[in-house]
Amino acid sequence: MRLFVVILLSLVPALPVLAGDGRLEINQSCALAPTGCFSGDLAGFPVTIDGSAGKSYVLTGNLQVPDVNTRGIEIRTSNVTVNLGGFEIRGPTMCSGTPLVCAPLGSSEGVAVANTFFDRHVTVMNGTVIGMGNHGVVVGQRGVVEKVTSVQNGNIGIFGDRGSILRDNVAGLNGVNGLHVAFNGTVTGNSSSQNALIGIFAGLGSTVTGNTAYLNGGDGVSGGDGSAVIGNTTYQNGADGITTSSGTLISGNAAYLNGNDGIEGNSGVTILDNACFDNGDAVDPGNDDGIECAVGCTVRGNTVRDNDGVGIRLGTDSAYRENVVTNNTTNGIAGAGAANNVGDNYCLGTGVMLSICP
């Protein structure tokens, strides 16, 4: 009889473990258990969330994925919250050197939505993802990632599809971009540093506010058409501090010691109340400007000093006013729109390159 009971119990699936607040627990022990962590999850990685067990999950210990091609947590449903609980999901990839190189590479992610093209409304928060072969965290459309540190991953640190919100995260030493939203996203309060390419990439119609991007190999912040880039700090990035496509607002930012232009905008851009100081490097001497924009721009109220090329370079049908442009290497104001001074600018140079507002 005892033997019969033991055999019977062994055939009954283990009940999922609930945290004190009712969230379903995820940890290394249950991930490797024969029954998985909860309904819908099989033994081994990835821990699979299909929604049949519930909608709220929490890490109660670190996860160690076995290789660069295996995900830590895979989400196959919508309206789910995964709280990393202050723990980490770790893979075997490491990133180091200048330029940054990550190895080994693979297809693994720490937390990932299985199909990013659907409206998943997934939230990932409060923990660390490190050393994944591909991206660190991937959420689908209208996802939220907040208070996550994502470092040393082979591709993008944190990726959000359309309409996603990336808030108060840290991304560093990733093999491509630190933070990336496809379009119509919100990127706010993050720090992105020492990534191989762009610190923060935000597609068309996105808002990028209050972030810090520094020591990235490419641009600090890159914004798509119709985006707003407001109140960010960019410094010592390898390319432009801030670069945007057409119809954008670039306001209240600081761009300092970036390798190329401090701020570069395409057509129909408003560049307002920014500080651009000492941008440019020895790679292309005399051609790295404080502010540069293409056709039909408005440039107003900026402070532009000590940049390697022109202080403000304006394209056709552009106009400028109320700027302070001093001590830039090549000239104060230049380009096809330089004659469109609509008032109250102050320009001053030194030595033979005396800069006078046209």
Image (cartoon, rainbow, N blue to C red):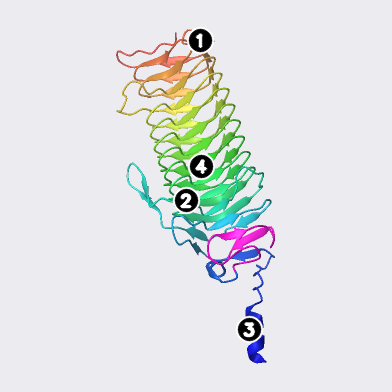
Tag 2's secondary structure?
Answer: loop
Q: Position of residue 352 (x, y in %)?
A: 30, 13
Query: Contact (CB < 8 A) between labels 1 and 4?
Result: no
- The residue type indicated by label 1 comes to Asn
Q: Main secondary structure of the magenta part?
A: loop
Circle nearer the N terminus (4, 3): 3
Circle nearer the N terminus (3, 1): 3
- The residue type indicated by label 4 comes to Leu
Disc 2 versus disc 1: distance between alpha carbons?
53 Å
Disc 3 versus disc 1: distance between alpha carbons?
87 Å
Disc 4 versus disc 3: distance between alpha carbons?
51 Å
- Which residue does the numbered mark 1 point to in the structure image? 341
Q: Position of residue 267 (x, y in %)?
A: 53, 19
Disc 3 vs disc 2: which is toward the camera? 3
- Which residue does the numbered mark 3 point to in the structure image? 7
- Which residue does the numbered mark 4 point to in the structure image? 179
Circle nearer the N terminus (3, 2): 3
326 to 187, vertically: above or below? above
User: Is residue 91 rendered magenta in the image?
Assistant: no
Along the line of sight, the residue nearer the viewer: 189 or 32: 32
Tag 4's secondary structure?
Answer: strand
Disc 1 versus disc 4: distance between alpha carbons?
38 Å
Q: Position of residue 72 (x, y in %)?
A: 52, 58
Disc 3 vs disc 1: which is toward the camera? 3
- The residue type indicated by label 2 comes to Ser
Q: Which residues are magenta?
A: 36-61
Numbered mark located on residue 107 in the image: 2
Disc 4 versus disc 2: distance between alpha carbons?
18 Å
Residue 204 appears in the figure? yes
